[in-house]
Amino acid sequence: FEAATSSEFTVVAEETTTLDLDLAKLPPILVVDDDAGKAYEGFYSAALGDKAHKVLGYDQLTSLSGEYLAQYEVVVWFTGDDYRSTFSAADQAALTEYLSAGGRLFVSGQEVAYQLKGKEWLQNTLGAKFSKDSSGSKAVEAFGLSFAIEGGDGANNQKYPDAIEANGGEMIATYANGMGAGVKFANGNGKVVYLSFGLEGVDSAANRAALMNAAIDYLSPSAEEMAARIDALAAMGTVDSDAAALALTDLVSTRVASEGAELSGSASRELRRMGSFLGLHQ
């Protein structure tokens, strides 16, 4: 369900023409580079390490929709220090749809809450409320880790890291002055981790990797949860949702085989219905 590429071949009347297609599998993690043209993506790729992922510039998301995003186990979306154009109405709609289908979202950006302050999407989807434009502290504790968001080999760009409050979410990061720096949120079928500072500003590669790993560990869906996402996509009943559901079946089948997971009868039946059961057993 990626953007199509084209090639030419010749079909001769009354002759059999065979075309072999080699379809690349999607990685489980999509990284959306929405930092208004800055060069922070390297910090995120390095923090993900050997976790299979794809980095896509925001301007390349020509087919952004919940169905498109649902092919990925986790979406990592970072905004750098952009304070003017993050999370448009279309972005919000696509991400809401993605989460309703069981998606997992990691958001990192120092101006996200400032730009979305008072918006229901910040409160109801990210599980947070805007508190203050500048936290007044560059020392953070998150997921049991202690680090600074200045100095070291980070981007040194955290001029106005937002302070936030939890709104349905659970606080998982605080600044040294006690103000909120991040939440995790079980959003219906989906899950969110939202950091109100930029991960790129964390002071060392080791701390950035440890923070990313903690977020991905919380967000990563099980094979059963991925199979339930196929059900949710199929219920949408569009051509795009069917295509995305088909793309997910191979991923789920591989996960079940590698994890030795047990799927429920309904999840197994849905995989068979999509035509890609691949020898799995109930």
Image (spheres, rainbow, N blue to C red):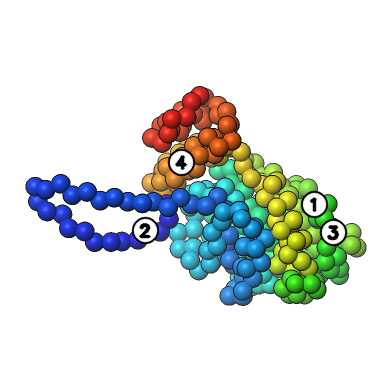
Amino acid under disc 4: Asp
Amino acid under disc 3: Ser
**Residue at x-position 54% and y-position 59%:** 54
Separation of marks 4 and 3 at Cα, in angstroms: 39 Å
Residue 16, how many percent across, how many down? 15, 46
Mark 4 and mark 3 lie on one chain; the one further toward the N terminus is: 3
**Residue at x-position 75% and y-position 47%:** 168
Name the secondary structure under disc 1: loop
Name the secondary structure under disc 3: strand
Separation of marks 1 and 2 at Cα, in angstroms: 40 Å
Instruction: Kindly indicate the quadrant of the structure image that contains residue 91.
Output: bottom right
Amino acid under disc 2: Ala
Name the secondary structure under disc 4: helix
Disc 2 vs disc 3: which is toward the camera?
3
Mark 1 and mark 2 lie on one chain; the one further toward the N terminus is: 2
Q: Is residue 162 left or right of residue 276?
A: right
Separation of marks 2 and 3 at Cα, in angstroms: 44 Å
Q: Residues within 10 Å of mark 4 (few under 14, many from 20)?
A: some
Circles 2 and 3, Cβ within 8 Å, touching? The answer is: no
Circles 4 and 3, Cβ within 8 Å, touching? The answer is: no
Residue that extends furthest to the right in the rendered view of this protein: 177
Where residue 146 is drawn, which disc sits there? 3
Q: Nearer the viewer, residue 97 or 231?
A: 231
Residue designated by label 2: 4
Q: Is residue 114 visible?
A: no
Separation of marks 1 and 3 at Cα, in angstroms: 9 Å
**Residue at x-position 32% and y-position 51%:** 21
Where residue 266 is drawn, which disc sits there? none
Where residue 143 is drawn, which disc sits there? 1
